[in-house]
Amino acid sequence: MQASPKSVFHPSVSIVIPAYNSEKFISKCLLSLFKNAAQYMGFCEIIVVDDGSSDCTYEIAWATIQECRRKWPNIHGKVVRHTTKLGRTEAVKTGVNKAFGTLTAIVDPQTLWKTNVLKELVEAIEKGGKAPNFTAVLYRTNTLREMLNSKTHINNFKPAS
C-alpha cells in the first residue's frame, strides 16, 4: 500500500502597501509582489491604501492591479483610497482592517521584492525563526489589528515568530 502524500498547509497572506504620492514606483512594486504571490501556494491578496495622494497613485495602482490580475487571476488585489492624507499608521490600519489573510506584510511602495521573498518569509514564520535580512516582515493579522486599534505605534510592534 502506498502512503498518501502529506498535506501541506499554506497560511493566507495579505500584503498591505500604504502609499502617498507614489506614482513613480507603485507599478514596479506591485509587479514584484504579484510575481512573488504567483509563486506562493496559499491564498494571497495585495491591498494598496492610497493615503490622499495628490498625484496619480490611485489610478496607476488600480490599472497595474487590473493588468496583473489578467496574468495571475488567482491573486486578489484592491486599492482603497483615503480622501485626505491621514498618515502612514492610518493607511496601514485601513489596509489591515480590509485584510483577509492570517498573516500580513506591510510593504513600502518603493520596495521591490526579489524572487521567493514571500515564500521564504512564510517558511521562516512557520519554523518559528526570523526571516533572513528582508525588507519586509510578516505579522499575525489579528495581533496587528489589536495593536493598531489600541493606538500602539507600529514601530513598537514585534513581528510574528
Image (tube, helix red, strand yellow):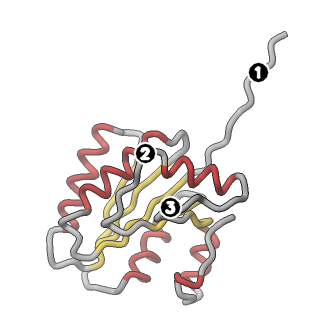
**What is the x, y in percent for residue 32?**
34, 51
Q: Quadrant of residue 2?
A: top right
- Residue depicted at 35% across the width and 85% down the height: 87
Residue 91 vs 80, above or below: the answer is below
Mark 3 residue element: loop
What residue is disc 1 on? 4
Residue 4 vs 139, above or below: the answer is above
Which of the pair 82/118 is nearer the observer?
118
Q: CA distance from mark 2 to mark 3?
A: 12 Å
- Residue depicted at 24% across the width and 57% down the height: 27
N-term-proximal mark, 2 vs 1: 1
Q: Nearer the viewer, mark 1 or mark 3?
A: 3
N-term-proximal mark, 1 vs 3: 1
**What is the x, y in percent for residue 26?**
26, 62
Three-letter amino acid code at disc 3? Phe
- Residue depicted at 43% across the width and 45% down the height: 115
Three-letter amino acid code at disc 2? Thr
What residue is disc 2 on? 115
Q: Is residue 107 left or right of residue 144?
A: left
Q: Is residue 101 left or right of residue 54?
A: right
- Residue depicted at 23% across the width and 45% down the height: 67
Q: CA distance from mark 1 to mark 3?
A: 35 Å
Three-letter amino acid code at disc 1? Ser
What residue is disc 3 on? 134
Q: Nearer the viewer, mark 2 or mark 1?
A: 2
Which of the pair 129/48 is nearer the observer?
129
Q: Is residue 146 left or right of residue 99?
A: right
